[in-house]
Image (cartoon, rainbow, N blue to C red):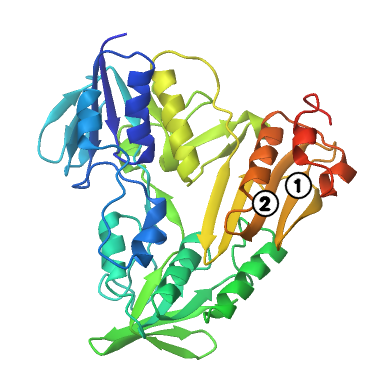
């Protein structure tokens, strides 16, 4: 197939889609437009190794310039796509350039949700979404610096762990009564909370925030109960908002992201969406429409969108997968942990465990695991494969650490 494939967004989904077009035999032009001045880079290290590095870190590029040139993939970076002319099949960028397309992929990602409080502004609240922001944050992580992290989700906690490793005095403020309320079982979240407290992090949970105070001498967060938490820096990690402005202006359907069908095709048959910006129906969970902010999802959807752009018809049906590293603990989740009605716990030894979520009919819907130094990776991978094949494992065997998970995976699909 020949023609013109245009990708807006130089993140994981966009970079992966460009390479997948070539791997699937596309011989026409492939162009990526990105607004950052870098080649596409990995985002997971930004809240981990980039912050904790002893020496100045380099951007963790996904593809080298030579690799992109070898595959004849053009990249236009440092400029923003500003409009889509759907009738004319063109995209215009901020510098006035016009790019024609036959098929267009929107991989515009998400942006950090801004803190809307009295006193909060760009001079006293930092965020983490880009490599440039990671470098700015890293410069604040000095031994003895007092940092307040607002938000007890994955980003906030990974930042807290990195800041403690660099010797900062860290306080995490979370409005919910516990950490990771949306994504992790309560007792697993309690274990993560205990690990942070053991590392010296102060956790303030169930807290309301009145306002942010600050001047050149320092900052403070004023809580609803009257406590004033002074600090040298404030970082907000309160979630992300999908980048949909371009799609909305072009008249595409939006529903908690750019609305796509099971092939990742938007309401325009020549435009597709992938990654953090894309909401899609997942057949594995009865067609439930979801949007995922996850590295694996961006990779998988980039690959899938490329095939769909080339005419493939199969639905996207990958098992959602997330992970987080904090101190010596690794947390991995396969599936959607808010699904299901029954929990079965398997003790993996060495302080590791995995929690399975089952539907009323016994079908495995999700698995959440925690343990030191990545010990859980093999078991969560087997669980992920069982979820994909819609397995209904024997409950007793699932919770028995003497029964190898591999034997349950090898049982016929739909039962074990």
Asked whether residue 352 appears in the rendered view, the answer is yes
Q: Nearer the viewer, mark 2 or mark 1?
A: 2
Label 1 CA crowd tier, 10 Å (few <14, some 14–19, many 20+) = many
Labelled pair 2, 1 in contact (Cβ < 8 Å): yes
351 or 213: nearer the eye? 351
Residue 21 appears left or right of 89: right
Assign the C terminus to one quadrant of the image: top right
User: Residue 101's quadrant in the figure?
Assistant: top left
Residue carrying label 1: 357
User: Mark 2 Cα within 10 Å, few/some/many (few <14, many 20+)?
Assistant: many
| Residue beneath the point at 34% across and 64% down | 53
SS at circle 2: strand
Instruction: Locate residue 378 relative to residue 280 in the image: left or right.
Output: right
Instruction: Give the residue displayed 29% in from the left and 72% down from the top.
Output: 121
Q: How many marks?
A: 2
How far across and down, in percent of the image, does residue 161 sit?
Answer: 47, 70
Per the image, the residue denoted by label 2 is 368
Within the image, what quadrant is residue 166 found in? bottom left
Q: Picture coordinates of residue 165 (x, y %)?
A: 43, 73
Q: Is residue 331 left or right of residue 267?
A: right
State the separation of the CA atoms marked 2 and 1. 8 Å
**Residue 22 shows which numbered tag?**
none
Tell me which residue sits at (47%, 66%) in the image: 156
Direction left: furthest residue: 96
């Amino acid at each position: 197939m020949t023609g013109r494939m245009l990708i807006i967004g130089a993140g994981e989904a966009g970079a992966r889609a460009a390479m997948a077009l070539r791997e699937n035999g596309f011989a026409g032009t492939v162009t990526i437009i990105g607004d950052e001045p870098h080649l596409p880079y990995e985002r997971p290290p930004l809240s981990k190794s980039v912050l904790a590095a002893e020496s100045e870190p380099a951007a963790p590029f996904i593809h080298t310039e030579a690799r992109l040139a070898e595959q004849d993939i053009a990249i236009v970076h440092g400029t923003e796509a500003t409009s889509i002319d759907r009738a004319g099949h063109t995209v215009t960028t901020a510098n006035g350039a016009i790019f024609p397309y036959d098929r267009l992929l929107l991989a515009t990602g998400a942006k950090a949700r801004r803190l809307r409080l009295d006193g909060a502004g760009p001079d006293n609240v930092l965020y983490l979404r880009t490599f440039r922001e990671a470098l700015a944050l890293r410069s604040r992580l000095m031994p003895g610096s007092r940092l307040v992290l607002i938000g007890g989700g994955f980003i906030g906690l990974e930042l807290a762990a990195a800041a403690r490793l660099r010797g900062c005095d860290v306080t995490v403020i979370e409005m919910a009564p516990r950490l990771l309320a949306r994504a992790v079982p309560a007792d697993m979240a309690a274990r993560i909370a205990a690990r942070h407290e053991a590392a010296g992090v102060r956790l303030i949970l169930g807290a309301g925030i009145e306002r942010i105070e600050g001047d050149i001498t320092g900052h403070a967060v004023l809580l609803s109960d009257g406590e004033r938490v002074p600090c040298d820096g404030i970082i907000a990690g309160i979630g992300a908002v999908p980048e949909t402005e371009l799609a909305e202006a072009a008249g595409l359907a939006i529903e908690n992201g750019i609305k796509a069908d099971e092939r990742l095709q938007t309401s325009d048959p020549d435009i597709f969406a992938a990654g953090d910006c894309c909401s899609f129906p997942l057949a594995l969970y009865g067609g439930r429409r979801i949007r995922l902010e996850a590295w694996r999802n961006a990779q998988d959807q980039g690959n899938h969108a490329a095939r769909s752009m080339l005419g493939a018809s199969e639905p996207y049906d990958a098992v959602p997968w997330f992970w987080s590293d904090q101190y010596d603990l690794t947390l991995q989740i396969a599936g959607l942990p808010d699904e299901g009605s029954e929990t079965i716990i398997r003790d993996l030894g060495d302080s590791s465990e995995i929690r399975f979520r089952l539907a009323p009919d016994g079908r495995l819907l999700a698995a959440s695991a925690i343990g030191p130094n990545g010990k859980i990776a093999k078991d969560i991978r087997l669980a992920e494969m069982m979820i994909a094949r819609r397995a209904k494992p024997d409950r007793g065997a699932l919770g028995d650490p003497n029964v190898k998970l591999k034997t349950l995976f090898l049982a016929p699909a739909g039962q074990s």
